[in-house]
Amino acid sequence: MYGIYDNGAVIAGFAAPLTVRSNRPVNVSDALSLKRFSSNTPAQRWEIETALIPASSSAQDLFVDIVSKGPTIATSVLMPQNYGSFLARNATGGASASGTAGGSTITITCSGLIPKGTFVNFGNNTKIYMLVDNCNNGGSVRVHPELRSNVAGTMYFKEDVVGSFYYDTDSVRGMMYSDGILMNLGTLKLVEAL
């Protein structure tokens, strides 16, 4: 189960509807000839908009996390994987990767298929990346966005990709109950901490 993560466990599971969005500022302009000019910046962050599974007996963990961290202190999120990538993946064991800051290619050592669309991160770095190419039994693949720092060592790609996110400023910073005992915050938005 994917969701808000604390002390080795999910304290609030994500529920449908769930949106994972790549936010990368783009400058687009049209000339009088209608020719389009566009450019983007190297800055990029992931944003998650999701419902949460209503909580009852474990609601205090989420309540404390939201109130104590709010929009200024990052919380950990177990990143939801693309369902198609999850189904196609047959890689066994762990994986390692190497790459250079600013590059969009990494070299992966693994056994089996890690499909494109898989979210990954590396070592103690909480920045989330997405594989743009399939990796079958290791090799060189592209990632999105470009690497923010050098990569060498463990690559997380299963249900172990944990990123740092802020609660968006529009998120409820308290409790909302439905049916008397179920804490239900409606839709929650999280933005990646860079």
Image (cartoon, rainbow, N blue to C red):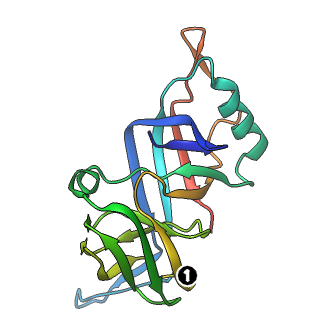
Question: Which residue, given by chain and number where applicable, does mark 1 sit on?
Answer: 148
**The N terminus: image quadrant:** top left
Find residue 81 and report its horizontal and vertical position in percent.
Answer: 37, 53
**The C terminus: image quadrant:** bottom right
Which residue: 43% across, 65% down?
A: 120
Find residue 7 and report its horizontal and vertical position in percent.
Answer: 67, 43
What residue occupies the far right of the structure in this picture?
A: 68
Relative to 113, 194 lies left or right? right
Which residue: 30% across, 74% down?
A: 132
Relative to 161, 132 lies left or right? left
Find residue 107 and report its horizontal and vertical position in percent.
Answer: 38, 84
Q: Is residue 48 visible?
A: yes
- Total labels: the figure holds 1
Q: Nearer the viewer, residue 111 or 74?
A: 111
Q: Nearer the viewer, residue 171 or 120?
A: 120
Height in image: 55 above or below 166?
above
Q: Quadrant of residue 73?
A: bottom right
Q: Is residue 43 visible?
A: no
Badge 1 marks a residue whose secondary structure is: loop
What residue occupies the far top of the structure in this picture?
A: 180
Height in image: 72 above or below 149?
above
Relative to 32, 151 lies left or right? right
Q: What is the crowding at mark 1: few (fewer than 14 residues within 10 Å), some, or many (at least 20)?
A: some
Relative to 139, 60 lies left or right? right
Q: Quadrant of residue 105?
A: bottom left
Q: Amino acid at mark 1?
A: Arg
Which residue: 39% across, 43% down?
A: 18
Find residue 48 and report its horizontal and vertical position in percent.
Answer: 48, 51
Q: Nearer the viewer, residue 36 or 88?
A: 88
Height in image: 5 above or below 92?
above
